[in-house]
């Protein structure tokens, strides 16, 4: 329960830090900006649907769109870490290997969330190299989780975790594409 409260508080703090309105910086965005921005990403449909579903998308510039996608990634990483923690708590087995791997994976997704949070700060200061680095790290943390399952004979990688891993990697790829677009437009 304590870690859930901490994660929720961290999530709220992240949103307050990253997503507060800064009218002097943000230009009005419309569907054309979203489409133009998303055309520069690997996962156009994911990009468009994620941005269209966020009401703030209509009032931000391209950097704001990148921040919104960072928030989507942060939510994914946080939810996956919570999911793994709940799996760890609900596992009614004495299999210490499984428990160790679930704990390691929960930690990796927490680190992914931390990296995404740092990338939001980097975007705010227009430090795009560090933002790129942090987002790339966030996309790579799930590999360490997957590898932990591979190193443990007899443990199958859960389909739900594979789905969440793919989702986080795709979200990070979208953010990286948006950052590439920001840099090339400068």
Image (cartoon, rainbow, N blue to C red):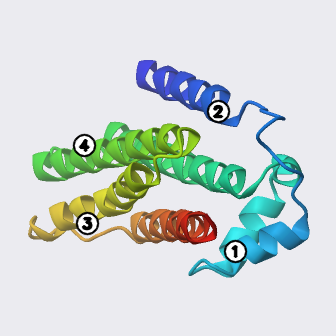
Question: Residue 142: x and y, percent?
Answer: 32, 60
Is 128 situated above or below 110? below
In this view, the residue in front, 112 or 38, is 38
Kindly identify which residue carries mark 4. Answer: 103
Front tag of 1 and 4: 1
Front tag of 3 and 2: 2
First in sequence: mark 1 or mark 4?
1
Instruction: Indicate the secondary structure of the residue bearing disc 1.
Output: helix
Residue drawn at the location 52% of the way across and 67% of the way down = 167
First in sequence: mark 3 or mark 1?
1
Kindly identify which residue carries mark 2. Answer: 15
Q: Which label was assigned to residue 38?
A: 1
The CA span between labels 1 and 4 is 35 Å
Q: Is residue 24 left or right of residue 44?
A: right
The CA span between labels 3 and 2 is 29 Å
Kindly identify which residue carries mark 3. Answer: 146
The CA span between labels 4 and 3 is 13 Å
In this view, the residue in front, 106 or 30, is 30
Front tag of 2 and 1: 1
Answer few, some or many: residues within 10 Å of disc 3's Cα (few below 14, many 20 plus, some between 14 and 19): some
Residue drawn at the location 49% of the way across and 63% of the way down = 172
Question: Residue 108: x and y, percent?
Answer: 29, 48
Answer few, some or many: residues within 10 Å of disc 2's Cα (few below 14, many 20 plus, some between 14 and 19): some
The CA span between labels 2 and 1 is 22 Å
In this view, the residue in front, 15 or 87, is 15
First in sequence: mark 4 or mark 2?
2
């Amino acid at each position: 329960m304590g870690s859930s409260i901490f994660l929720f508080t961290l999530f709220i703090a992240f949103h307050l830090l990253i997503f507060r309105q800064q009218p002097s910086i943000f230009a009005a965005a419309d569907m054309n900006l979203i489409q133009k921005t998303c055309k520069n990403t690997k996962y156009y449909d994911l990009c468009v649907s994620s941005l269209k579903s966020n009401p703030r998308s209509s009032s931000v510039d391209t950097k704001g769109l990148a921040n919104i996608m960072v928030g989507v990634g942060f939510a994914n990483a946080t939810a996956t870490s919570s999911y793994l923690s709940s799996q760890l708590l609900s596992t009614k087995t004495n299999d210490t290997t499984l428990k160790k791997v679930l704990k390691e994976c929960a930690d990796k997704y927490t680190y992914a969330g931390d990296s995404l949070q740092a990338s939001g700060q980097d975007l705010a200061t227009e430090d795009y190299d560090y933002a790129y680095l942090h987002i790339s790290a966030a996309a790579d943390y799930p590999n360490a989780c997957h590898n932990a399952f591979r190193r443990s004979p007899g443990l199958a990688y859960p389909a739900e975790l594979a789905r969440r891993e793919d989702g986080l990697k795709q979200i990070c790829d979208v953010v990286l594409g948006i950052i590439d677009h920001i840099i090339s437009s400068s």
